[in-house]
Amino acid sequence: MANKSCIIRLSRYRNALMRLKALNFVKVFSENLADAARVTAAQVRKDFSLFGISGNRRGGYLVEELLEQINRVLGKDKLQKFIVVGVGNIGRALLNYPGFKKNEIELVAGFDIDASKHNREAEVPIFLLEELNDFVKDNGIKFGIISVPDFAAQQILELMIQTGIRGILNFAPICLKEPEDCVIRNLNFETELENIIYFTNVTEKTEVR
Amino acid sequence: MANKSCIIRLSRYRNALMRLKALNFVKVFSENLADAARVTAAQVRKDFSLFGISGNRRGGYLVEELLEQINRVLGKDKLQKFIVVGVGNIGRALLNYPGFKKNEIELVAGFDIDASKHNREAEVPIFLLEELNDFVKDNGIKFGIISVPDFAAQQILELMIQTGIRGILNFAPICLKEPEDCVIRNLNFETELENIIYFTNVTEKTEVR
DNA sequence: TAGATTGTTAATCGATTAACAATC
DNA sequence: TAGATTGTTAATCGATTAACAATC
């Protein structure tokens, strides 16, 4: 079945397709999408077949149709609302990030224990942590982002789960345990940079040969 | 050989080890690290053997020794300097992110085309884009972060490569092509959230059965 | 020594790629 | 029709896991 990489690629095809659409492209071939997403054409077709997405044997895919089908898979058919717990550096950057709105993703509120960050009037309001439970339940929020320091992360996770949140992106540098019927993705900037450092150094060394 | 996931796990083991060290732990078993990084014990040992990292057949691993060996693999034996191009939301958050310093990673400067962001006196100075080339060459920088809008990303990439940068983390929602002997990692917030949305929805559905 | 844990090999599992028949 | 591209099957490749001999 669909794995994580498969969905990442679908997102990438989608990004490329939106750019093509803006250029008034009508058709696209698996080969083109492969180039855009840095994969093979066979993989593009394989990915599509996994989701029952089909094109024309001869004419490739219609940009508009393909976008619609991918959107359906990725849940773009309706607005997906997230809340953010921890309005520090990263939390604030995410709340101000303009890329989400175009993609049917909305960060609807921030939460922080620090009362000085509290701001009910902001475009995206910042509430006190105590208000999380009511807000999530009242608004039927399913998704959250954790951007608190590592020592607080586990506690915030449990709180989020209790309120009914089911999908979480965690920026704290600690691997949170995925509770039953929940989805957690751990993302950490240090780890990303360490990856780059390692592979850059390896590339340099192998080159010397 | 070592793949991307393998290095991500190494970073995670390291995070856990640093926490154990702070708690004055002396020894650790593959089983413990497996729990911390959410993998199997067999995988921990396999990962270590790949890098020639060894413990004691009976007594597990010495925290201090293990940390040193992982640090060597990840390039933690010296400070790794990055520059950031694009001082918007994300760029600024990264420049202020406190997690890097503890990990032998330093963001030494930011660059932006917008002169109003220019600030030579800041703790981490922000320069004009024109100054990138000289700065990178003068300081022997090897690593960079791209946090500019998508339409500018490819151009910035080429500029970075010209200056001698060899490892890049790209936040723009476009898959940049990895030039010969360079390492590029594409990281995109929308894509991360789309992943969570998809798998959360799938989890919910399968549960209903 | 007896017991426990490592390090490594072999088995399994899953994802990617190649190839080609179907077909527009 | 002839040519080109899809959709899918089979082959390959690589990563994870299981198992167990080595050994502290």
Image: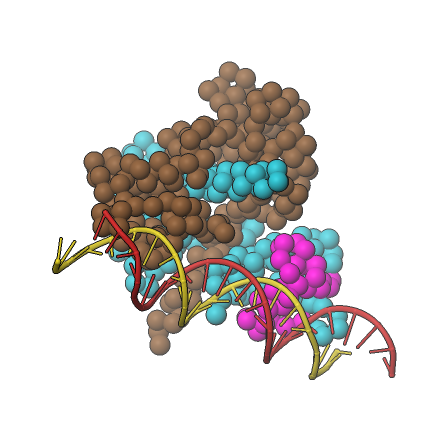
Chain colours: A brown, B cyan, C red, D yellow
Could you say where residue B165 lies in the image, as x and y percent from the top left?
34, 56
Q: Nearer the viewer, residue B101 or B63?
A: B63
Residue at point 49%, 66% (across, down) = B2
- Magenta stretch containing residue B170, yes or no? no
Residue at point 68%, 55% (across, down) = B35
Count of marks, rendered view: 0
Residue at point 29%, 59% (across, down) = B179
Residue A61 seen from this side: yes
Residue at point 74%, 58% (across, down) = B25
> Which secondary structure type mostly characterizes the magenta part of the structure?
helix
The residue most toward the top is A121
Q: Nearer the viewer, residue A190 or A108?
A: A108
Which residues are the magenta region? B26-55
Q: Quadrant of the C terminus of chain B?
A: top right
On the picture, is A31 further left or further right than B81? left
Q: Based on the displayed image, in which of its 4 quarters is residue D19 positioned?
A: bottom right
On the picture, is B33 further left or further right than B51? right
Could you say where residue A117 lies in the image, as x and y percent from the top left?
56, 24
Q: Based on the displayed image, in which of its 4 quarters is residue A133 positioned?
A: top right
Residue B150 seen from this side: no
- Magenta stretch containing residue B48, yes or no? yes
Q: Based on the displayed image, in which of its 4 quarters is residue D16 positioned?
A: bottom right
Could you say where residue A121 lies in the image, as x and y percent from the top left?
51, 16
On the picture, is A93 further left or further right than A149? left
Could you say where residue B94 lies in the image, as x and y percent from the top left?
46, 42
On the picture, is B39 further left or further right than B28? left
> Looking at the image, is D15 positioned above or below residue A115?
below
> Looking at the image, is A3 positioned above or below residue A130?
below
